[in-house]
Image (cartoon, coloured by chain):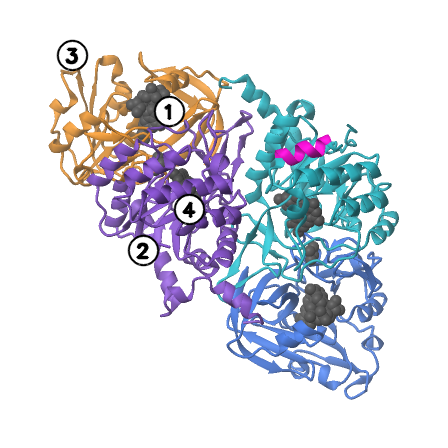
Chain colours: A purple, B cyan, C blue, D orange
Amino acid sequence: MIPLPEIDPPLINASGILSYPEVFAAFESAGACLGGYVTKSVGPREKPGNENPVVVYPPEGAVLNSLALPTQSAEDWERDLEEIRLRKAKLIVSVYGGDAPEFAEVTGRMSRFGDAIEVNLGCPNKEPGEQTIMESIGQNPALSAEVIERVRDETDKPVIAKLSPNSDYLAVADSCLEAGADALGCGNTLGPGLAVDIRSRAAILAGTTGGISGPALKPINLRMTYEAYSRFRCPIVAYGGIETWEDAVEYILAGAGVLGVGTAFMRKSTHEAAALTRDIWEGIQEYLDGEPMSALIGAAHRAAEGGGHA
Amino acid sequence: MIPLPEIDPPLINASGILSYPEVFAAFESAGACLGGYVTKSVGPREKPGNENPVVVYPPEGAVLNSLALPTQSAEDWERDLEEIRLRKAKLIVSVYGGDAPEFAEVTGRMSRFGDAIEVNLGCPNKEPGEQTIMESIGQNPALSAEVIERVRDETDKPVIAKLSPNSDYLAVADSCLEAGADALGCGNTLGPGLAVDIRSRAAILAGTTGGISGPALKPINLRMTYEAYSRFRCPIVAYGGIETWEDAVEYILAGAGVLGVGTAFMRKSTHEAAALTRDIWEGIQEYLDGEPMSALIGAAHRAAEGGGHA
Amino acid sequence: MRSVFKVVENRRESEWTHTIFFDKEIESQPGQFMMVWLPRLGEKPFTLSYPNAVTVKKAGEFTEKLAALEPGDEIGLRGPLGQGYPPLKRPALIGGGVGIAELRLLALASEEPSFVLGGRTADEILFYEEFRALGPVHVATEDGALGHKGLVTELLPVEAESYAVCGPERMMAACLPKLPAERTYFAVERYMKCAVGLCGQCTCSGWRVCTDGPIFPASTVAQMDDFGKRRRSKSGRWEAV
Amino acid sequence: MRSVFKVVENRRESEWTHTIFFDKEIESQPGQFMMVWLPRLGEKPFTLSYPNAVTVKKAGEFTEKLAALEPGDEIGLRGPLGQGYPPLKRPALIGGGVGIAELRLLALASEEPSFVLGGRTADEILFYEEFRALGPVHVATEDGALGHKGLVTELLPVEAESYAVCGPERMMAACLPKLPAERTYFAVERYMKCAVGLCGQCTCSGWRVCTDGPIFPASTVAQMDDFGKRRRSKSGRWEAV
Ligand SMILES: Cc1cc2nc3c(=O)[nH]c(=O)nc-3n(C[C@H](O)[C@H](O)[C@H](O)COP(=O)(O)OP(=O)(O)OC[C@H]3O[C@@H](n4cnc5c(N)ncnc54)[C@H](O)[C@@H]3O)c2cc1C
Ligand SMILES: Cc1cc2nc3c(=O)[nH]c(=O)nc-3n(C[C@H](O)[C@H](O)[C@H](O)COP(=O)(O)OP(=O)(O)OC[C@H]3O[C@@H](n4cnc5c(N)ncnc54)[C@H](O)[C@@H]3O)c2cc1C
Ligand SMILES: Cc1cc2nc3c(=O)[nH]c(=O)nc-3n(C[C@H](O)[C@H](O)[C@H](O)COP(=O)(O)O)c2cc1C
Ligand SMILES: Cc1cc2nc3c(=O)[nH]c(=O)nc-3n(C[C@H](O)[C@H](O)[C@H](O)COP(=O)(O)O)c2cc1C
Ligand code: FES
Ligand code: FES
């Protein structure tokens, strides 16, 4: 297994949040505590994604998005990553495609930029007429393994298999690790879910349904992290409703070594968002109280195995 | 297909909420607008369920429960239902078992009391050492169909197949309807999810994980309702985060004819809870503005098919 | 509210009873309760005896462990939950066993309280000296070591403007006919699971004790057919009180 | 905030421009925007011109439909979103095209405003009479039908204590060097998807216009290499402004 690059601090953005390198660079300039930048998922061909509305946020901490992976072409992404340089964050290129060869094609192009490659196996959104990646690949252990194998052939960078919570994810993770993945991403958005406008009697999202992110996702992806760590003891990058340092610590105790922040940036200016990342990282450090972070990763399992009351 | 009894108003409690007939009777006495009472899921044998804590409610509208179907014996349930009479609500007996014969056994005993039988195919909780019903049955279309068939043999009352959101629920629904189910329950709790206490580094729930209910579940079960109605046009009893009349209307527009309220009763006294049911029903009626409710069921589909902007 | 606190003191009150103090105060109405969590052991209902303490009678595994906590140990608390007492004027506070501890915050919040306390022996009359400083205290012990020899019900009726009763259910049931239906309150106990009104486990004749109670007016209790008679076990089966 | 309102009036302002009034007022800071939703058609950004209206220039399918709404039709609104203008003293409000409408609420909220407005022809100088009642109005039209014949930039500089510019990006870029870096604000437009800072679509040199803007101080705009030059299309591809 190829180790993940050292991401310091171990906080990153979630793919599709901020999306473009110049946005991440602005966060860095504003003093964000983010040790890594994950690109928007890069696909082989230009694709506009769904029409607006692409987000709806019913009350209570759930954001539904139906972006459906808009992307410029991989070629244009290359130009972007050549032009726009980050200060010191590691660069994780998120890749997707309609099938294994497409994933491989994009990885082949992007590998030289990335300190790691994240393979998006779990997007639950689609443009009309498409199938979602979640349905066509991410829910199927064999097809997911095929994607990872082909990606593996194209890169010597560490490969993160980012899973869907709406799958038999332990089976999928198992075949991905078998096929050469070095780490798991736990995970993509949930559902998808639906929101209906009762006045017009219409589904609100142009894509009808949307993947759920934010606090409502946390218990689900936290369990995924916990179960994946328990089974595989492999490096885990966690995503899902991380808004505070306490959320981050829950994920670390469950088994995550890198924490991705996405929906928590909602409605935050660049300066507010940068401050949020600093608060999260300071909170984690105070909690650690001098212990190395490695001592904390998966500690909930050791405590559970130890048994007895604390 | 056997029609569901007329549930008027079309609001009921969700199974496992209130649980016992005398609690429901107290709600009725307090003027609750509930046209049907669903029992706690009745199992064949006495079973204590998980130790406390059995609930945790991380902020943001998600309740995790790991009760794991505590039940007195079916025999004791018979005695209860003989002793405690409801005023005028219809009685829906929720049943479960470890396998099809157990579901059948319980249904055989309970059928005479029920105006309908709800088959719990989706509980995602378990006592240590058990398998969840969701895993052992509800995620498998063939085994679910077997359960429904056996239940069907034991009762001439309408049978509601209550699905898990964590399943390929359209496939499961398809085989259940094929096997003789008269309606779908959309659906049980989500996940399960995890919550970790960062001070003691322990999972909070004694059962480690717990099914998610409340507002966080709404977009998921609303989509299930929408998709099930779209595919089957069958009667649907909907559950999941219904707290206001607007929530109820969303479910009705998506395709539900009966609405179940569960987590919304959290921390509400009997009088407050009864008032909540009245508010929901009044809100629905004002929204209907004289139209019959049947005109509204599934209206979001007709609007979508109609196309164009409203 | 859900939080984990640190224990700062374990004060032995009697042979069977300890008060466990923790490092933060909780604002509650007298009569409301907390779900006390010991990680990996369980979660059970207790009433605050101080804003930052519960008084615990050893009754089984959980209470044994709870009563043995030491400074620095962690204790989880969820609450305050349920309905407490309304403000009471010149109340007689009638307590039995560890129920006496559950009356302490009510006593401190009440004008001119008086006390009617019962226990097996003198040691069990918790907070005796403290209560004597607040108002007249009438005591009954089964062994006669303090006050009247016999049951607390034998001291009733007493003169007061209101009444609050907290103790073993059969003692409370015996008090019920001896007290006025108005301005009298009972603290009902049932097995609790969710403690937030969802599961129905804590039913007493259909009232959910965790949410409608645990404090009920006597007029309601008088209509509870199950009070003093039967309750639902952990699995829902009826058992005698 | 997300709500569906009823249209109460469609007021034609010019050949290309309509103001759509709805049945509730929305509290916002001048410069903040709303995502306007037409069920089953789409959702696009607009600035309030009245607390209960948007003024829309027909530019494509969505704005055609929006400008054709009739009383009784439904209009969905999400917002207010983004950062508006700070309070401005004696501002010169410099508007081009439908950008003039976006300055109306700012004009009403400002002390002693003056106006510098440009358009293709007289018809496009929105709210002309209303603005004249508020302060001096300088106009440039391309066809010379009203005021100076030529571009609005040709009227600059003007004397004022602060400046707010809202119009086509190339006009704004031309204004930038003619205005002081302090106390000057620009209304930046980019293609918007989420409109809440998540997707990054609306980037202008890394600032998310939906959340950091749409109103930016000139000092920030001056550092935006992409301003007036390039923007990301719906798919993220660079295109010229
Ligand atoms: C509202 C309320 C307030 C209470 N306040 C206090 C208090 O301030 N001090 C105190 O010492 N005790 C109090 N109790 C009782 C206390 O909860 C039990 O003594 C404790 O749960 C026993 O647990 P155990 O494991 O030690 O004993 P076990 O061996 O489990 O049981 C002993 C007794 O406690 C009861 N019990 C066990 N678990 C629960 C539960 N989850 N809910 C309710 N009863 C249970 C059993 O029914 C049995 O009668 C209160 C109970 C309630 C309902
Ligand atoms: C913050 C902000 C405030 C605005 N306020 C107003 C206003 O008050 N009145 C007004 O008439 N117009 C306003 N606009 C512009 C308005 O949003 C576009 O004219 C409208 O979206 C065009 O849609 P269409 O389908 O009619 O045209 P299209 O044919 O889709 O496009 C025409 C032009 O509008 C732009 N556009 C299309 N969709 C979007 C989108 N989702 N986000 C941003 N730009 C888009 C396109 O890039 C193109 O330049 C504002 C734009 C922004 C960003
Ligand atoms: C607007 C939006 C766009 C997203 N785009 C992508 C994407 O392109 N690729 C991907 O792997 N995940 C995408 N996701 C999922 C996030 O990366 C992340 O896994 C998820 O949102 C959970 O984290 P959060 O709750 O912190 O947002 C997107 C999520 C949102 C909300
Ligand atoms: C405490 C609790 C206990 C439950 N017990 C059962 C049960 O016994 N049988 C069942 O089919 N569903 C059970 N459920 C699921 C509910 O019936 C319902 O499907 C779910 O909670 C979603 O509705 P809500 O969000 O309104 O609570 C339980 C849910 C909760 C919260
Ligand atoms: S303990 Fe669950 S309702 Fe009271
Ligand atoms: S439109 Fe999504 S970040 Fe601005």
Q: CA distance from mark 4 to mark 3?
A: 63 Å
Q: Looking at the image, do the residues carrying marks 2 and 3 touch, with CB atoms under 8 Å apart?
A: no
Q: Is residue B288 left or right of residue D97?
A: right
The residue that mark 4 highlights is A161
The residue that mark 1 highlights is D54
The residue that mark 3 highlights is D144
Asked if residue B268 is positioned above or below residue C150 in the image, the reply reads above
Which label number is shown at residue A71? none
Q: CA distance from mark 2 to mark 1?
A: 46 Å
Q: CA distance from mark 2 to mark 3?
A: 61 Å
Stretch of the chain drawn in magenta: B170-178
Residue sitting farthest toward the bottom: C145
Q: Residue at x 66, y 34 (%)?
A: B173
The residue that mark 2 highlights is A7
Q: Residue at x 28, y 47 (%)?
A: A27
Q: How many marks?
A: 4
Mark 3, residues whose alpha carbon is within 10 Å: few (<14), some, or many (≥20)? some
Q: CA distance from mark 1 to mark 3?
A: 28 Å
Label located before the other in sequence (2 or 4):
2
**Ligand 3 occupies quarter:** top left
* Magenta stretch secondary structure, dominant: helix
| Tag 4: amino acid | Ala
Mark 2, residues whose alpha carbon is within 10 Å: few (<14), some, or many (≥20)? some
Is residue A268 inside the magenta stretch? no
Mark 1 CB within 8 Å of ligand 2:
yes
- Looking at the rendered image, the quarter that the N terminus of chain B falls into is top right
